[in-house]
Amino acid sequence: MKFPSRAACIMCHLRLTAFICGLLLSQANAAEQSDFYIREEIPLPEGEIMEVGSIALMPNKKVAVTSRRGDVWICEGAYEDDLSNVKWRKFASNLHEPLGMYWKDDSLFLTQRPELTRIQDTDGNGTADLFETICSDWGMSGDYHEYAFGSTPDREGNVWIVLCLTGSYHAYADWRGWCVRVTPDGKMIPTCSGIRSPGGIGFNAEGDCFYTDNQGVWNGSSSLKWLKPGTFQGNPTGNKFHKLANLPEPANPKTGSRITTERERFPDLMPPAVILPHGKVGQSPTGIITDHSDGKFGPFAGQVLVGEQTHSQVQRVYLEKVNGIYQGAAFLFLEDFESGIVPLRLSDDGVLFVGGTNRGWASRGSKPFTFERVRWNGTTPFEIQSMSARPDGFELAFTQAVDPETASDPASYEMKSWTYIYQKGYGSPEVDKSIPKVTKATLSADKTKVRLTVEGLVKGHVHQLDALGVKSSEGNKLWHPTGYYTLNEIPN
C-alpha cells in the first residue's frame, strides 16, 4: 500500500481548511431578518378571539384594531419597548367583519360588509355610543365570501372600497366585483369593474389606489392592481352592473388568451401592475401600505408593502410608470409571523403593525391569530433597492456599494420569463416560458447601480432576475437576491 507523501497531506489539509473557512464565511455572510428588523408579538386580551381584520393609528400612540367577529379594541403601550405593560379596552361590538379602519375628526371610520360606518364616543366614557351609516349603497347576499375592504381617505377625502364576488365566482348582490368610492358626504361612485377576490386596498406614494386580487378565475396568479377610474380589472362576472350606472356593458374577454393580447382588443383592460408569482411570492396577498416613514423603517422609503396571508409574510414592491401604465418588481421582505397577515399599518416613526388570522384558510405560524410589530434596528441590509425597466434591459439600484468584479460580471445574473393564461378557469400554470440573457452589466461611478443589457425581453411577461453572484463592497451576499418584474410596457 502506498501512503501519500507529507507534502500531499499538508496540501490536502490546507484545501480542507480553506473549504471549511469558505463555508463558514459563506454562512457568516448569509443575512438573517433579525440582523435588520425586530419582530415582536404584542400581547392580546386574555381569552379573546382576536382575528385582526383592520388597524387604525390614533392620537397619543393608541392603536385601534378590529376583530373579524365584529369587535373594536383600543390598545395602549404598543409602541413601548416593554410590551408587558400593554393595556386593552373594548370600544365597540356587534359590527359585521370590518376590513378597513382609520381615525379622523375624533371618530373611527370602518368599512363593514354592508356599509361604511362612523363610530364615536360622545360622552367620554371610553366606549362608542354613536354609530352613523355613511353609505350602504352596495348589496350583500349573506355569502361568507362577500368581503368589503376599505381604504383610508384619498386626497379628496374619498374612501375606496373593493367588493368581493359572491363565493368569489358569482355576483348575486349589487356591485359585487366592483370598486366604488364613497365621498365625504356619503355618495357612492362606481369606479372600476373586474374585481374577483380582493385581500386589501391602499395607495402608493403618488396617491394612486391599488388593490390585491387573488389567483382564481380570470386571474392566472395573484397580483397588485392599479384602480384607475373607468378601467376593467379583468374578471367579467360583475360587468352586468354597468347598467346600474347607465353604462353599456362591455364585451367579455376571450378565455384562453393572454392579457397582452386582450389589451389590444379592450383598451380599458388594466393589466396587473405587479404579478406576485403564485407560490414564489406568497399566494394570498392582502393589505397595502406605502413606506412613508422617510427612512425610519429602512432604505425603502416610498415603496409599497403588501401583506401575505398564507405564507405569513410582508412583501416589498417597487412601482414605476412606463407609457402611462404601472409596473414594477416584487421582492420577498419580512417573514416568520405567527399567523396569516391581513392588515398592515406603518407609523410615522417607523413602527410596522400587522394583524393576523388563519380562520378559513391555512397559514404559516403557530397561532390562529396574532398582533405583531416590526421595527428597523438601524442596520442597512444589502438588497436590490429598485429594479427599473430600460429599452434594452433593466437598471438595478442597491442599498450599498457593490463589489465591482462581481456586479459587472454578466455571469452573476440569470433571468427567466413567463406569463399566464387569461381564462375563466381557476388560475394558470406558467406558460410561454423563455430565457432572456444578460449580455452586459455596466456599473455606475458610485458603485450603487448596475445597468443590465438583456437579450430577449418579452412584453407582458414576468421577468425573474436572480443576482446570486453579486456581492457588496464588503463581500456580503444579497439578503434577497431575486426580483420579479412585471413588464407590461417596454420603455421607448
Image (cartoon, helix red, strand yellow):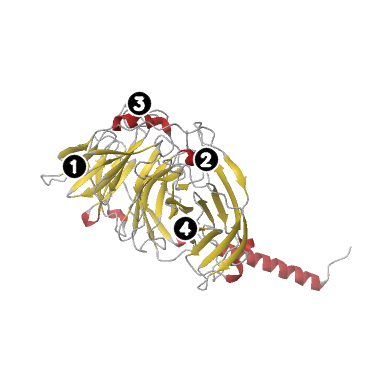
The percent position of residue 348, horizontal first and vertical second, equals 30, 59
Q: Mark 1 packing: few (<14 Cα in 10 Å), some, or many (20+)?
A: few
Q: Quadrant of the N terminus?
A: bottom right
Residue 198 can be seen, yes or no: yes
Q: Is residue 251 above or below residue 81?
A: above
The residue singled out by tag 2 in the image is: 261
Amino acid carrying label 4: it is Gln
Q: Mark 4 packing: few (<14 Cα in 10 Å), some, or many (20+)?
A: some
Compare marks 2 and 1 and give the one earlier in the sequence: 1
The percent position of residue 302, horizontal first and vertical second, equals 38, 59
The residue singled out by tag 3 in the image is: 172
Extreme-right residue of the structure: 1
Compare marks 2 and 3 and give the one earlier in the sequence: 3
The residue singled out by tag 1 in the image is: 185
The percent position of residue 285, horizontal first and vertical second, equals 43, 44
What residue is shown at x 58% (from left), y 64% (from top)? 470
Amino acid carrying label 2: it is Thr
The percent position of residue 478, horizontal first and vertical second, equals 53, 61
Relative to the observer, which residue lies in front, 323 or 408? Answer: 323
Compare marks 2 and 4 and give the one earlier in the sequence: 4
Amino acid carrying label 1: it is Asp
Q: Which-is-in-front pick, marks 2 and 3? A: 2
Q: In this view, does 138 lie above or below 206?
A: above
The residue singled out by tag 4 in the image is: 33
Compare marks 3 and 1 and give the one earlier in the sequence: 3
